[in-house]
Amino acid sequence: MKHTLQISWIAIRELIYERVFYLLFSFVGLALILGMFLGQLTFGEQAKLTLDFMLGSMQIAMVLFSIFMGISLFQRELQMGSVSMLLSKPISRSSFLIGKYLGQITVQLGVILAMTVVVTLSCLKFEEVHYLAIYQAILLIFLETCVITAVTYFFSVNAGSITAALASFAFFAMGHYTTDSNRKLASESKPLIEIIAAIIPNLEVFNLKTFASYGVTISARELGLSFTYAMVCTVMFLVLAVLTFDRKDILT
Amino acid sequence: MSSTPCITITEVTKIFKTGLFKSKKAVDNLTLQVPQGEVIGLLGPNGSGKSTTMKMILGFLKPTSGQILICGQSSDTKMARSFIGYLPENPRFQKFLTGTEVLFYYGKLLGLTGLALKKRVEYLLEMVSLKQANKERVQGYSKGMTQRLAIAQSLLNNPPLLIFDEPMSGLDPLGRIEMRNLINTIHGENPNSTLFFSSHVLEDVEILCKSVAFLQAGKLKTYASIDSLIAGEEQRYEIVLQNISRELESTIFKHCPQRDVATGKSFSLEGPEKLSWVLSQLIEAKTKIVSITGQRRKLEEALFRANERLSLKEVSL
């Protein structure tokens, strides 16, 4: 566990040193510009539009962050060869992989908290905003990024940077496409899609953006189920990644 | 413990899949035992299986068959890796860390903590002459400094086995000398540690190592001490003469390699018997001898001849 935490700490420092703040500044900049212009462009539904845009941007930014930073953190060590010095020490490969994952998730949590502050400040001027609904939606965006990051690590272990990025984006897209209604339609017409839908988790479970815009909250039970679903998916993909990485020949 | 060999490689084969139906045997039934305290050079041309062997020892690659033990422990265990200090060919570190931070990071991964770690880091930074640059980020380090920092991290827990992959690669001549001196210092301070390193430069191996293992096409061709390899060869002498007559030149030195030097004409002779005979002839002819120098056979030639003998043996079998 000590080794895992050591590796996490270095991963956190690496992400902070590298590019993480560019993402944050981009988001803050975008939110400010949006706050200035959206209110002038629309009448009556400024709050809903602003929230929709902000939460959508947050989700995309976090997914991009999960995939690119995940690949960068893991693949760079392999390509640079620094992994060889790490793994020549008495640490397990699972400590290395999980350490990196936990480091990245910690930074993602920090980034999403900072984004939450920006969203909250931007919404202060609106009266009809339901903050609990917003925070629930943000929490689920974070849970979704936990799953996507685990998936990215799984693909990074098995493929090169570009393939892993493409596969992770495809996973994200299909995860949102394979909603319950689409699954039913697919099972009637296309068996291949049915099989894919059965394997890929339903990421629409984590989409509460529309609920937040309309000020609708979900129950604690539903929130708990989403949390459990995210944890199960995350652990499953991380275990698969660790098992594959354990058997992988390291050529660097 | 002391009688246990540091590295025991038993009938190890590594096959890489290179395509759907294609595969390549990188290491072929390799058996090798390296005793403790040995400084051994792993030699061989590109693609001979040196790196693959090293990576299997480190547990990065799993042998297709056979077994590797490090101080009696299987090479894929954490225990085995705690006996190893590794210097890769092109060491890279997280560029945002300083030299001290790098050593603290790796030290903690090795289970070192507190004052013991602090003292060890300070001692190693001093040893590798990085004390001045210890607070500098490694992204500003030169190739030589990075190499020295990598050596320091390999020595953190004072491991009984040091594996250095091409430690002189990419260094300028001065850097090479520094690195050789550093390796000598390391082994001088801990003579019981085993140093296993690969190199393309035979001169480095000849200076640093006690023995060599020569790989070719994944097979072990030679494993012997450098002294025994060179001792089997005849001593060579270089003799410089002035005003030598054409008659002597065409009779005595008919088959000897020769070249013009500033002080006269230089001839190469092999073996003490030939030298005695040539000297008696020269004295009789009253030829002026400028100098006679004994030349040690180079490892390169010794290895070449050893492999030639092996090949002939294989053919005759």
Image (cartoon, rainbow, N blue to C red):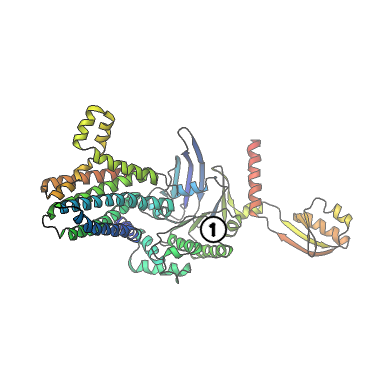
* Residue B226 pos. (x, y %): 60, 54
Left/right of residue A222 with respect to residue A182 in the rendered view: left
Image point (66%, 36%), residue name: B316
Identify residue type, mark 1.
Gly
Q: Is residue A136 above or below residue B310?
A: below
Left/right of residue A216 with respect to residue A153 in the rendered view: left
The residue sitting at the bottom extreme is B132
Left/right of residue A166 with respect to residue A141 in the rendered view: right
How many marks on residues?
1
Where's the C terminus of chain B, which quadrant? Answer: top right
Image point (31%, 44%), residue name: A169
Chain of the residue that carries numbered disc 1 in the rendered image: B
Disc 1: CA contacts within 10 A as few (<14), some (14-19) or many (>=20) = some
Q: In which image quadrant can residue A182 be found?
A: top left
In front of the other: B202 or B41:
B202
* Residue B307 pos. (x, y %): 63, 45
Please name the residue that numbered disc 1 is placed on: B170
In front of the other: A41 or B79:
A41
In front of the other: B311 or A234:
A234
* Residue A71 pos. (x, y %): 35, 49
Q: Is residue B158 above or below residue A74?
A: below
**Residue A208, visible in the rendered structure:** no
Q: In which image quadrant can residue B281 be found?
A: bottom right
Image point (21%, 51%), residue name: A55
**Residue A57, visible in the rendered structure:** yes
What is the secondary structure assignment of the residue under circle 1?
A: loop
Where's the N terminus of chain B, which quadrant? Answer: bottom left
* Residue B64 pos. (x, y %): 44, 39
